[in-house]
Structures are given as structure tokens and as C-alpha cells.
Amino acid sequence: MMAPQEIVEALHALELELLAPATRQNPERLQAILADHFREFGSSGRVYSKSEILAELAQELPASITLSHFEVMLLSPDVALVTYESQRHQPGLSPGLSPVRARRSSLWMLESAGWQIVFHQGTAIPGTAISG
């Protein structure tokens, strides 16, 4: 089922917000966006709970992360699957190093307070370094 444009725009904005260093370093905002039963399968193969990802992000060095190929599939009126490709550009790396790329998927649920992410998975794209 194709998602209405306002849902696509809302989820795109939330995914961009989750990639922003200011949000990634803001535990209060992350608490609101991540569902209590959140799980992540990182591109490294690690599995994170909500508390583990909050701790991990608190230690993360700021990076520029962009996304492309963004798509939303509405699974029900209040559940959406988001897929995209991310590119992580780490400041201070040697010039000429390519960004770390991954294919990503997120499962979002519409709760009374708004959309919350309940699951996220990153899969490293061959030929790039692994992070998270």
C-alpha cells in the first residue's frame, strides 16, 4: 500500500532528524522518537536495545550522514516500513576515503504522541567500512 504524501514527508523528516548529530546527542529527543521496545540490528551485526543505542549514540563522534533512495510502504494505517541508503561522512578521515554506505530499513508505528520507530536495521554495502 502506497503511503499518502503527508506520511512520507513526516517519516522522511524523522529519519533525517535521527541522522542529525544534534538529535543523536539529545537523549530526551531520542527517548520521544524511539519506542520503549525499540530494537536495532546494526550494520556491524550488533543488536541494540533502546537503552543500548542511547548509550552508544552518547559516545558517537559527530558525522555527516545523508540519505537517498527513500521509500515508504504503509503496512497498515498506523504502521510504515521505511527504506533508504545512508552515506556516513566522518570528519577528519583521510581525503579520498569514500563514505560508509549502508542500506537501511525502519519500522515506524503511529502512537498517540506521533510516529515512533520500533525497529531499525542497517546492512553494510560491500566495499565500504562497517560502522554501527
Image (tube, rainbow, N blue to C red):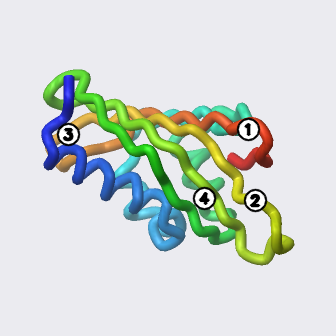
Three-letter amino acid code at disc 2?
Ser
Q: Residues within 10 Å of mark 4 (few under 14, many from 20)?
A: some
Residue receiving disc 1: 44
The label number, if any, that marks residue 98 in the structure image: 2
Horizontal and vertical percent position of residue 51: 55, 46
Horizontal and vertical percent position of residue 42: 64, 38
User: Mark 2 or mark 3, which has the lower sequence index?
Assistant: 2
130, above or below 120, in the image: below
Mark 2 vs mark 3, foreground winner is 2
Mark 4 vs mark 1, foreground winner is 1
Residue receiving disc 3: 111
User: Mark 3 or mark 1, which has the lower sequence index?
Assistant: 1
> Who's the residue at 13% across and 39% down the image?
4
Residue receiving disc 4: 57
Horizontal and vertical percent position of residue 88: 64, 59
Three-letter amino acid code at disc 4?
Leu
